[in-house]
Image (tube, rainbow, N blue to C red):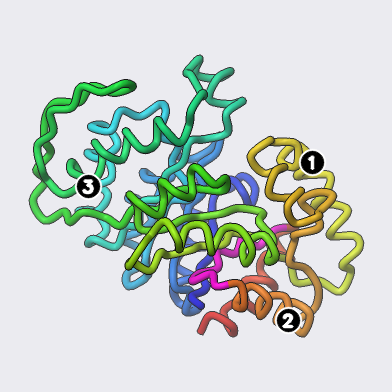
Amino acid sequence: MRIGMAFGDVRGPAPLPEITRQIQEAAAGGAGTAWVTHGVGWDALTTLAVAGPAAPGIELGTAVVPFPQRHPLVLAKQALTVQAAVGNRLTLGIGAGIARMVSTMYGLPTDRPARRMREYLEVLQPLLRGEAVDHHGETYTAVGSIDLPGAEAPSVLLAALGPAMLKVAGELADGTITWMTGPHTLADHVVPSITRASGDRSPRIVAGLAVCLTSDEDAVRARFADQFALAGQVPEYRAMLDREGAAGPADVLIVGDESSITKQLDRFHDTGATDLMLAPIGTPEEQARTTAYLSTVAG
């Protein structure tokens, strides 16, 4: 199982040079992928275009760029521009976004997210391959093509949790990225669902979780529960927590000393996930200790 690291909003506000330094540190420590989250802070793709060239060798990914506010022609052009900037090391993670944010912040429709995603991918994937599209569909009109010299089509992963979106991910994308999804839910729901939908292909399954190396597990869990309380109320995440039997986000936090964290990571290996996307959380000192330990596991 490949171990990558997450950067951006999920770890708290940080200047762009600091995120660049963190990604360089992860690359030097043997992390398989540097994933940049996309929330209310830095734009994930632009961040990778800036930080990626400073960290050669490591795969770079977005986790994840919401698609509703980005026409497929716009996202394809931006993704291929980043590909050219980072030497074709990009994995493009996209998702429907948190429905409440998409509707209230942008005034965009959030109904039938799997249907909208399916049509979006039917347009996006050819564009990423440099093919022309002439699409007049139910939710999108897209006419044109993008030809950027030296930019290869990136692998595309979907943030997919529910059955309908996992089916789309298996049929039209290269895999899925989850967040705050526990080992039982991965093993019993996510992995078998997307594997069935993928047919003869082997999907990539990236499990994203927060992690903290500490000797005071109870204090860290309490702090995380408070900081991520709103995330636990988001319907998309709440459904996965309910499947897991988790009261809240703190119940799927990877936390403890070195031995405990190692055992918890082993549980995810047994789920069938292909990758872990680990986000060190806590104070700068806690994040530094956690990152240093994870480099021994990833390397």
Q: Amino acid at mark 2?
A: Lys
Mark 1 residue type: Ala
CA–CA distance between discs 1 and 2? 26 Å
Question: Could you say where residue 18 lies in the image, as x and y percent from the top left?
Answer: 52, 55
In this rendering, would 119 be left or right of 187?
left
Q: Secondary structure at mark 1?
A: loop
In this rendering, the count of numbered labels is: 3
Kindly identify which residue carries mark 2: 263
- Identify the mark nearer the N-term, 1 or 3: 3
Q: Which residue is mark 3?
A: 80
Q: Is residue 70 above or below residue 250?
A: above
Q: Is residue 277 magenta?
A: yes
Relative to 273, say whether 270 is above or below: below
Write the residue at 39% across / 36% down. 117
Discs 2/3, front: 2
User: Residue 242 bears which disc, if any?
Assistant: none
In percent of width and height, residue 67 lies at 40, 34
Q: Position of residue 86 (x, y in %)?
A: 27, 58
Instruction: Say if 233 sits above or below 296 in the image.
Output: above
